[in-house]
Image (cartoon, coloured by chain):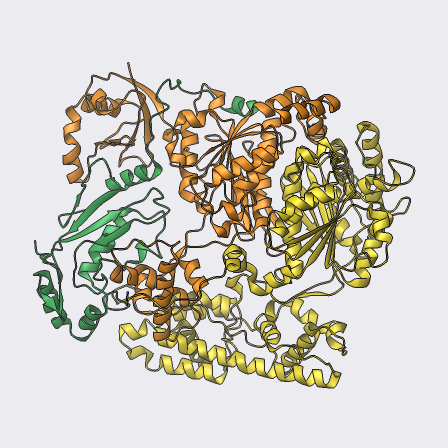
Chain colours: A yellow, B orange, C green
Amino acid sequence: MADLPPPVQGPTAKEKKYDRQLRLWGTTGQAALENSHILLINSGPGVVGLETLKNLVLPGIGNFTIQDSAVVSEADLGVNFFLEEEHLGGFRAERTCALLKELNPDVQGNFITEPIEPFLNKPNALDPYTLVIVAAPIQPALLMKLSAHADASLIPIFYVHSVGFYSHFSIHLPPTFPIVDTHPDPETISDLRLLKPWKELLDFATEKTNGLDTMDHEDHGHVPYIALLLHFLEEWKKGHDGQVPQNYKEKTAFRDIVSKAARTNNAEGGEENFDEAVAAVLKSLNPPEPAGSVRDIFKTKECLALSAESASFWVIAHAIRLFYTKYGVLPLPGSVPDMKARSADYIQLQNVYKSKARKDLAEVVESVRFLERSLKRSTPIEEKDVEAFCKNAAHIKLVRGRPFHVVQASESLKWGDRAKSIAQTLAFPDSLIPLYIAFLAWDEYVATHAKDALGGVPKVPGETDVETDTEKVTGVAIKFLNDLVKEAAAHIEEDELYIIKAQTGEFAQELVRAGGAELHNISALTGGLVSQEVIKVITEQYVPVDNTCIFDGVKSRSAVIRV
Amino acid sequence: MAEVASSSVLNVLEGPRAKWKYLDNILGREGPFTDPEWEPGQPVFEGLERAKVLVIGAGGLGCEILKNLALSGFKDIHVIDMDTIDISNLNRQFLFRHADVGKYKAEVAAKFVEKRVKGVKITPYCGRIQDKDDEYYMQFAMIVCGLDSIEARRWINATLVGLVDEENPDSMKPLIDGGTEGFKGQARVIFPTMTSCIECQLDMHAPRAAVPLCTLATIPRQPQHCIEWAHIIAWEEERKDITLDTDDPEHITWLYQKALKRAEEFSIPGVTYSMTQGVVKNIIPAIASTNAIVAASCCNEAFKIATNANPFLGFPETENYMMYTGDESIYTYTFEHQKKPDCPVCNPNALARPLHVDGNSTLQDFLDGLAERPESQLKKPAIRTEAKSLYYQFPPSLEEQTRPNLSKKLNELVESGEEVAITDPAFPLQFKYKLIFK
Amino acid sequence: MLKIWSMKQQQDEAAQAGTKKKKVTAAQLRVQKDLHELSLGSTMRTTFPNPDDILNFTLTIEPDEGMYKGGSFVFDFKINQNFPHDPPKVKCTQKIYHPNIDLEGNVCLNILREDWKPVLNLNAVIVGLQFLFLEPNASDPLNKEAAEDLKQNREGFKRNVRASLGGGTVRGQSFDRVLK
């Protein structure tokens, strides 16, 4: 019994349940999910929205609400997993809400059976929600209203189609949507500063490479490769007017020098630390220049012109810009990759990087505090937020959210500043822009056809007369296509344009074939995509789609375009 | 009985396929990409209902696959899984509830989907895929896999390749395979012997990164090194007689404490309980959304193969593999993975050919005869069945042990119809025969 | 589906029976091929406790030169069905005094762990094992005491090896007698 270890605070029940996802977005991401309230405005067969919610209820969003005035019909039972036979004739919102709630007792679910128009007309109807998902079909006037709400309240709106074998979704994000925790590929995150070493790092290298040539095999084989590279860089500089290797040719020459310095007369016939040094030359001997996208953030007006109301992101970005202007580098992230080394040497090296990172952080924090004082901001920015920013400064992303297309009856479609770039990619083989255009034409049909005179339930193409509707939708799609080419003033060869039009026609035909039907697989797949993007947007982690994604289930391909 | 009666009343009122209204729009209408010879309507409905599908795995992907197939109009589904439900499954395996923890996944999943989607029959088997024989696999029209084990994938792949009989079109079972890891995943379609198989694609699975044992023993640098040391070295030194159970919290706690102590000795920060669990159990992050995407992609292909409602992945010389990445925006890459001409499982020589032999002849006679066969011309063959080493020329100890078999009659060593595999140092490939006694 | 089938050329005759029979597994086949390529020489031999099971066997190494000459070292090979994706599991069955083999029989050989690749074969593994007895390696050892001895005093290390092979005690640790 004496051997038994003292009790450990094991994982809680919640940590156990969410273990596999906490390993991705951590407790802060999870807390963000738990504080969210998602509204689904459901319509059509109504599957894609529910499949999306399923993948959000499971990982534990705080709250969801389903608005849906439809009544459960026999056809629902063949496509919707969250309905049962006994629900026939009941409200779809109520029944699906109940079955979704079963998936996770920690999630609150609500439903609204009031039709969408009166619901949206109530003042402050959208106030409780932190994110809205809208399933097509929907009347354009209502979609416009939602889009205006997204603009005014900075609430993200997702607009989703799932029609037959095809699907589409667009995200309307706030005009500035910054992400600090982008989870870059671990291979790309090390910033070793070999070309801009500071004193403590150079001292470390000198100490560890002292008497390199006369070291015994054991010591020689354990010098951390960072120290080796710094040592050989100093040697190189002696013969090159104090310059480090400048170009590919010099870098390969430098690499050869390092490679030849490895010992081969030992038991292993080579040295792992030298192998690592050689492999790192081309990758690590680059000036620590931040990526263009990061420098662009420094130049934005939000970053330059701070106010008391600026989001913390911009205050920190401004402070880091000051740091960059002063030193020509970003704050050091402070992480060191694993490498062949003795434990104590590696820990010592790790501490050299960590203390430099802490020093850089302290300087940025000081700037932040100064900015806060001069802007007279009331609540101080938490130091952990500044630290997270410093650690990931080279990989921060800024997404510029914008409205997606809302197709209005008898109004032409505008592509604005995106026209040129979209028209250019039209002619790429396998381009899915023609499919996007076909979806817009499908929306145009919805905008111009109503099931009843009151304009209630939207009518979708292909419900009854496939041939006529195909002709209509194709006609509108071709018109949209021509308008795009015209607006972009793009020059496309006649025969190329012919092919693009034929493709657009095929996409339109396949869309109409569905007659508004959702295929469960396509809706499940799209629900997976949309929920994943919702999670990224809510947690402000990873990089969301900017701003439109299209899936082609005939060829199993996808595309992301900014419209 | 009351239930049956009420549903049939509804059917009368609204037509027998009222439930499938949406599906029938697609199955009842031609599209721009459907084959000109394809006939929509009744024959397609019937074909779909007749197609018996096997689902391997009832976990994250499996739950999705069962739901998707049931709502795609498949009527007869079988599912195999040997696992029981764990609490950490509940964040994505949506057919399971807290009260189901400890029960068999296949059974709970089958029951749930059968209850939810009326008219579908789901037959669970709680056990290993290796428990089942060729006859079992022969009954299915296709197999959809949602597995996390490479070994199980290789097994079912080899089994399905072996099932292919040149004279019987029904013997070629399309294999649709999905896999996920965090925000990444893939869906692929294999027509055994016709297109690139799992074995051809083995290099698509990255091997698990390992750290040298000596680093663990002598120069640990990372918290993971301390955990691996506790796992591989300390446990064996101190608790050799207890089999490590990575699901036993006491065992994980012990490893955690050991790792923590070692990390302190070397001033290594960062060992946590959760990391200990992750390293020791080789935990791969898993989320509902990626599973939904990959499973639905697999089922979309299964549906297209069963109905021909549109072209599917995997048709020879076309794309057969979709790679998915969702952490940075959304990216998919759909391509044709080429068949490997020297694939040890699906190259033409690796397929067992039937060979008619005299069961009363000796193994020596048989091998002499093989040496003369033009396709083999073997010099120093080694030959075995799944169960028995028949004859090995090398190494010497094995030669000595198997030599007595040379003078035995074939019918004492193998059963008629049994497969033998023959390799020879003179050839890079192997030969397989099904020995059929005359 | 039928279209695909019609693309497939009809070859050979049909199999008629035996669908229930188990098939030789991919791992078995690969090991069978690897066995052809083993070059055991005069210093190594294999033993198959069950000759029908080629995935589990032992390898005996009897070095004819170097410090471990005269010893007879037995390694247990366990190969799983995921071979060659997974490396073989190899352990020394005796308690021996060697810097790269610990007292539990774990062996520090790169190709058994971090550097294993499916293109490597069993011969590469046995060559690596053989090499360990010719060139014991003191850097990053599994048995630190043995490595320390080798580094500090090669002659003393040799004497310790001799003592340990005979079943003697080194630094208070007794070893298995492994002389031929």
Tell me which residue sits at (54%, 46%) in the image.
Answer: B97
Above or below for A293 versus B397: below
Number of numbered discs visible in the structure rendering: 0
Q: Quadrant of residue B354?
A: top left
Task: For the N terminus of chain B, give its image quadrant.
Answer: top right
> Considering depth in this image, is B80 or A513 the residue closer to the camera?
B80
Above or below for A289 versus A34: below
Can residue A528 be seen in this snapshot?
yes
Task: For the C terminus of chain B, give its image quadrant.
Answer: top left
Q: Is residue B60 left or right of residue A147?
A: left
Q: Quadrant of residue B343?
A: top left
Tell me which residue sits at (86%, 55%) in the image.
Answer: A122
> Considering depth in this image, is A251 or A337 the residue closer to the camera?
A337
Q: Residue furthest top?
A: B438
Picture coordinates of residue B53 (x, y %)?
52, 30
Picture coordinates of residue A548 (x, y %)?
72, 51
